[in-house]
């Protein structure tokens, strides 16, 4: 038995095939990979936020990752724009390009292509793109070998809190093992995705690091807005008592004034009075809270989507509309390329190596939004080129128009005026006329071929090889015109007399055995003989020359 080659992962470490069949980073209650999370956003202050970010910079990202998760849960705007960016990539169809033209290259590409045609793929890529917010993500590949072949069973998202980076470079990912010790990632086992909002360490390149400051300042603004509304959004209650009111009367009045805001009811002696004084111009006093919150949201939109027009309903002005949409498309294209590169490196190449061994060329995943194309212009351009000999694959043309390959028994459309190449079989006696759905084609009278002297002269000018045969060709063309013309005249008469395609078909089939072809057969026999003799004469002339 041939020994399997030793495979190396992207870091040059040997791959242990036995460990690939095990789930190595599943969550455990009470263990080092607990699914329970903390909430460092509660009571967040600028000082605490600075400490959390410094901890992440030093290689301890737990509280930063928990804060990033909390912001997505508590800030609808950040969740919306981040989800838009991730889903815009997930819904694009993934294609696979072959690494070469051999049958083996095509088989490898088909293997990957068939696996990608899964309903779960959109959710799996959405989880991988969690790296856009946090800066990186980890996805465990659960391999299936039940059929004797290597194939990914599913891609399982793993909480990034369960991973660290090597202290010497803060770039090499490591996994927290069962004993709490950092371990190297098993080769061919994880998809390690990095999505850079900026250059630098993965712990400092996520959008969440920028969003934390905006979210904290907006939280302060919302809190102040709520306090202001609570305080000045309802009238001020003032209780008045007379000079003869004692301490007990004053306490009764205060309780009534204090509770009437929530209870909207109260009782006081008839010698006391409560007035409601409404604050004026409250609307203008609260506008600055809303403007500040909206301004902070726009900054988040710029950071995540690169623009604001598609999220904040701003129109008009330079850079609006189509220009902002182009910016969003550029970011989407960059995300697509980054995700494709990650999947090719951490999924496709390991899979092919496990199944087939190392290859000179590998199939490649492409994630690209198709650009709108003027199909009419394509049709107008490709027809003349094909007529001039350009070789174009039918599959490529069908793909342009999004059409599948026609089944063998499918009804085929034909150019107007063209008789199908394959005529339907003659009906058996007693079968009757097939229904129209089974026999649809056009019958028309195509003009006889231009076999005359003008056509031959054109052919001579283009080839320069028929001048010696000109007399024979002219005679054959003249003799063939008579029998062909008689056949066409009879068919024309039947078509004019028929009231439907079915009747015309029956008339043609009935008359076909009686159509005389003797003259045409003789002409064709003489034509073949003349062509053979003329060809030999031309060869001898060229040899003598």
Image (cartoon, rainbow, N blue to C red):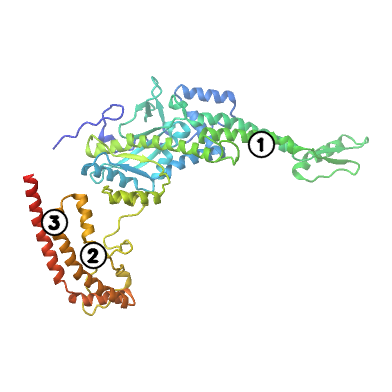
Instruction: Please give the name of the residue rendered at 41% of the width and 27% of the height, measured from the top-left corner.
Output: 164
Q: Where does the image place residue 169, in percent across and percent down from the top left?
A: 39, 21
SS of the residue under disc 3:
helix
Q: Is residue 378 visible?
A: yes
- The residue carrying pointer 1 sits among few (fewer than 14), some (14 to 19) or many (20 or more) residues within 10 Å by Cα, namely some
SS of the residue under disc 2:
loop
Pointer 1 residue:
290
* Pair 1/3: label in front: 3
Towards the viewer: 475 or 303: 475
Which comes before the other along the chain, label 2 or label 3?
A: 2
| Quadrant of residue 260 within the rendered picture | top right
Mark 2 → mark 1, Cα distance in angstroms: 74 Å
**In the rendered image of this protein, does residue 385 appear above or below residue 416?**
above
| Quadrant of residue 254 within the rendered picture | top right
SS of the residue under disc 1:
helix
Instruction: Please give the name of the residue rendered at 61% of the width and 30% of the height, measured from the top-left corner.
Output: 217
Report the quarter where the C terminus lies.
Answer: top left
- The residue carrying pointer 2 sits among few (fewer than 14), some (14 to 19) or many (20 or more) residues within 10 Å by Cα, namely few
Residue situated furthest right in the rendering: 244
Q: Is residue 457 left or right of residue 300?
A: left
Towards the viewer: 406 or 87: 406
Report the quarter where the N terminus lies.
Answer: top left
Q: Is residue 42 visible?
A: no
Q: Is residue 472 left or right of residue 334?
A: left
Which comes before the other along the chain, label 1 or label 3?
A: 1
Mark 2 → mark 3, Cα distance in angstroms: 34 Å
**In the rendered image of this protein, does residue 479 appear above or below residue 198?**
below
Pointer 2 residue:
422
Pointer 3 residue:
469
Q: Number of callouts in the render?
A: 3
Circles 2 and 3, Cβ within 8 Å, touching? The answer is no
- The residue carrying pointer 3 sits among few (fewer than 14), some (14 to 19) or many (20 or more) residues within 10 Å by Cα, namely some
């Amino acid at each position: 038995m041939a020994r399997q080659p030793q495979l190396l992962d992207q870091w040059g470490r040997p791959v242990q095939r036995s460990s690939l069949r095990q789930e190595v980073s599943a969550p455990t209650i009470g263990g080092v990979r607990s699914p329970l999370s903390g909430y460092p956003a509660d009571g967040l202050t600028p000082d605490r936020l600075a400490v959390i970010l410094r901890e992440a910079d030093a290689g301890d990202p737990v509280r930063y990752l928990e804060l990033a998760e909390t912001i997505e849960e508590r800030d609808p705007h950040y969740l919306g724009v981040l989800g838009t960016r991730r889903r815009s990539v997930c819904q694009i169809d993934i294609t696979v390009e072959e690494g070469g033209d051999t049958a083996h290259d095509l088989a490898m590409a088909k293997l990957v292509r068939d696996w990608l045609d899964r309903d779960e793929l959109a959710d799996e890529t959405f989880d991988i793109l969690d790296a856009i917010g946090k800066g990186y993500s980890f996805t465990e590949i659960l391999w299936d070998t039940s059929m004797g072949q290597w194939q990914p069973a599913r891609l399982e998202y793993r909480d990034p809190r369960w991973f660290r980076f090597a202290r010497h470079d803060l770039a090499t990912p490591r996994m927290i093992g069962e004993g709490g010790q950092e371990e190297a990632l098993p080769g061919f086992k994880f998809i390690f995705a990095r999505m850079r909002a900026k250059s630098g360490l993965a712990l400092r390149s996520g959008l969440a690091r920028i969003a934390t400051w905006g979210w904290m300042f907006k939280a302060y603004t919302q809190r102040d807005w709520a306090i202001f509304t609570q305080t000045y959004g309802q009238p001020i209650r003032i209780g008045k008592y007379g000079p003869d009111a004692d301490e007990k009367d004053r306490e009764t009045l205060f309780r009534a004034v204090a509770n009437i805001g929530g209870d909207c009811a109260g009782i006081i002696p008839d010698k006391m009075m409560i007035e409601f004084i409404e604050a004026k111009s409250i609307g203008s006093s609260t506008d600055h809270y809303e403007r500040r919150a909206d301004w902070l949201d726009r900054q988040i939109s710029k950071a995540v989507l690169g623009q604001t027009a598609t999220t904040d309903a701003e129109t008009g002005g330079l850079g609006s509309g189509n220009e902002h949409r182009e910016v969003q498309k550029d970011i989407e294209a960059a995300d697509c390329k980054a995700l494709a590169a990650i999947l090719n490196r951490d999924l496709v190449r390991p899979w092919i190596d496990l199944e087939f061994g190392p290859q000179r060329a590998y199939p490649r995943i492409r994630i690209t939004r198709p650009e709108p194309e003027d199909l009419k212009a394509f049709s107008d351009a490709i027809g003349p080129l094909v007529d001039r000999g350009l070789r174009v694959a039918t599959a490529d043309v069908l793909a342009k128009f999004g059409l599948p390959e026609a089944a063998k028994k499918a009804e085929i459309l034909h150019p107007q005026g063209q008789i199908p190449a394959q005529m339907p079989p003659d009906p058996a006696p007693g079968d009757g006329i097939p229904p129209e759905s089974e026999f649809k084609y056009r019958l028309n009278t195509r003009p006889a071929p231009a076999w005359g002297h003008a056509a031959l002269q054109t052919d001579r000018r283009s080839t320069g090889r028929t001048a010696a045969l000109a007399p024979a060709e002219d005679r054959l063309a003249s003799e063939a015109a008579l029998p062909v013309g008689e056949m066409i005249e009879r068919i024309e008469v039947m078509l004019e007399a028929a009231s439907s395609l079915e009747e015309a078909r029956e008339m043609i089939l009935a008359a076909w055995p009686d159509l005389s072809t003797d003259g045409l057969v003789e002409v064709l026999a003489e034509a073949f003989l003349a062509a053979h003799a003329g060809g030999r004469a031309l060869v001898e002339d060229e040899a003598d020359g």
